[in-house]
Image (cartoon, rainbow, N blue to C red):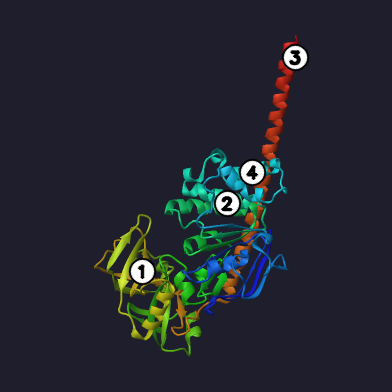
């Protein structure tokens, strides 16, 4: 396993454009790091710089404290799993997995190759497919073959370049689970590139959010969600996305297009002296049909009336939509944000989460409660989150780090127990077989 250190990495192409611009990240030994962002943000380029498929314009790349900028890919002892699987169609599953071992001519005996291939096959549930060709496998099975080829190399780290993007939604969910369990069980350092924020939030110990080659924030998924550093991170992380609502400050009230919202005391201190207009960041779950709010929670929020254009009932949850007229003073910033997020425009609507049994429907007005304790306030010019609590966010990431260490330890202990149990069963089976053979021999000689 390995610790990977990126120090001020820069990648410039011939036109001088920095596809990766001064990125510094420390990946701990055994950590699962996700690189996420919209198309063209530089995440795949950064991954290719780590593995050695892209030259580093400036900066330092260290693997286990050793500088590897000038090392060839094969000398970095990293395994990469590609988006298109990169399998050889004329080779069986067995031979595809064994291929990197056979490349190291003479380094591994036939018995060692067989042992490594079958161990990887067993880990990935591929035993019954070893003699099949890739064309006869499903997308998920091909992906597992590609992962098996990475496992047998005994690499210091796994690198994944959008490995699930070719799979359908159901299979992606299944493979996410398998990759997460495999990484925990092996405890191997992994860097995973994706544009899918759901993958990022469910897989990563920490997530690095990139925009136009620049690192915006790196933290645990929960810190990114609850304490985003800026508008871009807040808008990218979360589904449905965070609502951004223009608000003008008048005393201790935010005047918004959907109603007046009382400014919480903690927010008053953060926005004092700021411009008279800000952007409120409100996630859908910060809202609720007032009929379903516990009385104890009511004083911690604001209740206002709003008219819904339509609702979406999804069985276990429901979303309501409220249209509003955009404030021209912030429209340019929201248009810029939409472009950064690969969207055509930022819709002038608020998405609210409703209890599944709420009877609010489109075309009706209803009282909605907003949990003001959880709102974010952004500077519309800089995009900075004015209400971010850095200490609380750092604590969330520290907790996630400790949980990761404990989870890896539990996974290793379970694997050891299963391995020992298998060995005991094998020894027991051997003893029983030997006893049976002895019994048969005795009866024959008699």
Is residue 54 visible to us here?
yes
Question: Given this view, does label 2 or label 1 mark the residue nearer the observer?
Answer: 2
Q: Nearer the viewer, residue 317 or 339?
A: 339
Counting residues from the start of the chain, the first of labels 2 and 4 encountered is 4
Give SS at disc 4.
helix
Q: Which residue is mark 2?
A: 147
Residue contact at pointers 1 and 4, CB within 8 angstroms? no
Instruction: Answer with left or right where residue 143 lies relative to residue 312.
Output: right
Q: Which residue is mark 1?
A: 351
Counting residues from the start of the chain, the first of labels 2 and 1 encountered is 2
Q: Which residue is mark 4?
A: 119
Q: Residues within 10 Å of mark 3 (few under 14, many from 20)?
A: few
Counting residues from the start of the chain, the first of labels 1 and 4 encountered is 4
Q: Quadrant of residue 44?
A: bottom right
Q: Which residue is mark 3?
A: 442
At horizontal 35% and vertical 72% (from top left) the residue drawn is 350
Question: Given this view, does label 3 or label 4 mark the residue nearer the observer?
Answer: 4
- CA distance for labels 2 and 3: 50 Å
> Relative to 409, is 258 above or below?
below
Question: Given this view, does label 2 or label 3 mark the residue nearer the observer?
Answer: 2
């Amino acid at each position: 396993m390995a610790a990977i250190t990126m120090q001020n990495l820069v990648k410039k192409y011939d036109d001088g454009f920095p596809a990766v611009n001064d990125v510094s990240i420390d990946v701990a030994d055994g950590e699962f790091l996700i690189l996420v962002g919209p198309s063209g943000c530089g995440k795949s380029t950064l991954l290719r710089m780590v593995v050695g498929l892209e030259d580093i314009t400036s900066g330092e790349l260290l693997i286990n404290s050793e500088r590897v900028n000038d090392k060839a890919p094969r000398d970095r002892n990293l395994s990469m799993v590609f988006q298109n699987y990169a399998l050889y169609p004329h080779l069986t599953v067995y031979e595809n997995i064994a291929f990197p071992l056979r490349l190291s001519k003479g380094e591994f005996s036939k018995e060692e190759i067989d042992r490594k291939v079958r161990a990887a096959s067993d880990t990935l549930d591929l035993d019954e497919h070893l003699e099949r060709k890739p064309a006869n496998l499903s997308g998920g099975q091909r992906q597992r073959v590609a992962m098996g080829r990475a496992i047998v190399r005994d690499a210091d780290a796994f690198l994944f370049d959008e490995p699930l993007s070719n799979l359908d939604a159901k299979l992606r969910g299944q493979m996410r689970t398998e990759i997460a369990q495999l990484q925990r069980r092996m405890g191997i350092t992994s860097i995973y590139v994706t544009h899918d924020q759901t993958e990022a939030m469910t897989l990563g110990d920490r997530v690095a959010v990139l925009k136009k080659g620049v690192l915006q924030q790196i933290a645990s998924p929960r810190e990114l969600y609850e304490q985003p550093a800026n508008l871009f991170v807040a808008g990218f992380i979360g589904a449905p996305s965070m609502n951004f609502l223009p608000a003008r400050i008048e005393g201790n009230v935010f005047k918004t297009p959907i109603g007046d919202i009382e400014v919480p005391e903690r927010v008053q201190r953060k926005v004092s002296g700021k411009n008279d207009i800000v952007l409120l960041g409100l996630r859908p779950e910060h809202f609720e049909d007032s009929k379903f709010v516990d009385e104890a929670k009511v004083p911690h929020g604001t209740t206002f009336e709003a008219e819904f254009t339509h609702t979406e009932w999804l069985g276990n949850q429901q979303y309501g939509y409220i249209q509003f007229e955009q404030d021209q003073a912030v429209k340019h910033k929201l248009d810029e944000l939409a472009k950064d997020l690969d969207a055509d425009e930022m819709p002038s609507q608020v998405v609210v989460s409703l209890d599944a049994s709420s009877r609010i429907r489109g075309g009706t007005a209803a009282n909605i409660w907003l949990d003001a304790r959880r709102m974010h306030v952004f500077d519309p010019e800089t995009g900075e989150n004015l209400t971010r609590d850095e200490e609380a966010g750092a604590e969330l990431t520290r907790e996630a780090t400790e949980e990761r260490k404990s989870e890896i330890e539990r996974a290793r202990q379970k694997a050891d127990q299963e391995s020992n149990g298998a060995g005991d069963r094998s020894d027991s089976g051997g003893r029983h077989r030997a006893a049976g053979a002895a019994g048969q021999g005795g009866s024959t000689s008699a």
